[in-house]
Image: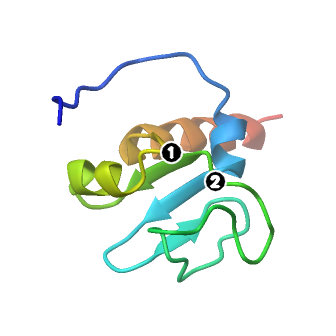
Amino acid sequence: MPDIIRVWKEIDITDIEKHLLIVGDVAGDCSNCRELGINYLSAKSCPKCGNEFKYIATRSHEIRKIKQKRPDLIFVDFEDYKKAIGKIKAKNLFL
């Protein structure tokens, strides 16, 4: 497998928020509706809200392993995602 490097690209964070599967130690979570316990190895969409997963992020550092198992999803850096969402929430507080 080729090396993995971070690439910066301007992207609509709200699209990521609606279609992100967040991988924990054992299972995944839907970032749109917060559904827990999703089988991240096979889930194409959220069983609760039905949103299709396009992106995947992890709280751990098992990027290569997860990317091998889910090559159909675009990998998003979880820390970058949290930072971007935090900025949006902070901005909305002052509107």
* Residue at 40% over, 47% down: 78
Quarter of the image for the N terminus: give it.
top left
Write down the residue under mark 2: 53
Residue 90: percent from left, percent from top = 64, 41
Residue at the extreme front of the image, as rendered: 1
86 left or right, relative to 6: right
Q: Around disc 2, counting alpha carbons within 10 Å, would you say few (fewer than 14), some (14 to 19), or many (20 or more)?
A: many
Q: Which residue type does callout 2 highlight?
A: Phe
Are the residues at dot 2 and dot 1 in contact (C-beta closer than 8 Å)? yes
As drawn, the label of residue 92 is none
15 left or right, relative to 5: right
* Residue at 61% over, 23% down: 11
Q: From mark 2 to mark 1, how far is it between C-alphas?
A: 7 Å
As drawn, the label of residue 73 is 1
Residue 40: percent from left, percent from top = 48, 68
Q: Secondary structure at mark 1?
A: loop
Quarter of the image for the C terminus: give it.
top right
Answer above or below: position of 16 versus 34. Answer: above
In the image, 73 versus 22, the foreground residue is: 73
Which picture quadrant has residue 23?
A: bottom left
Residue 4: percent from left, percent from top = 22, 31
* Residue at 42% over, 53% down: 70
48 left or right, relative to 36: right
Answer above or below: position of 17 versus 38. Answer: above
Q: Around disc 1, counting alpha carbons within 10 Å, would you say few (fewer than 14), some (14 to 19), or many (20 or more)?
A: some
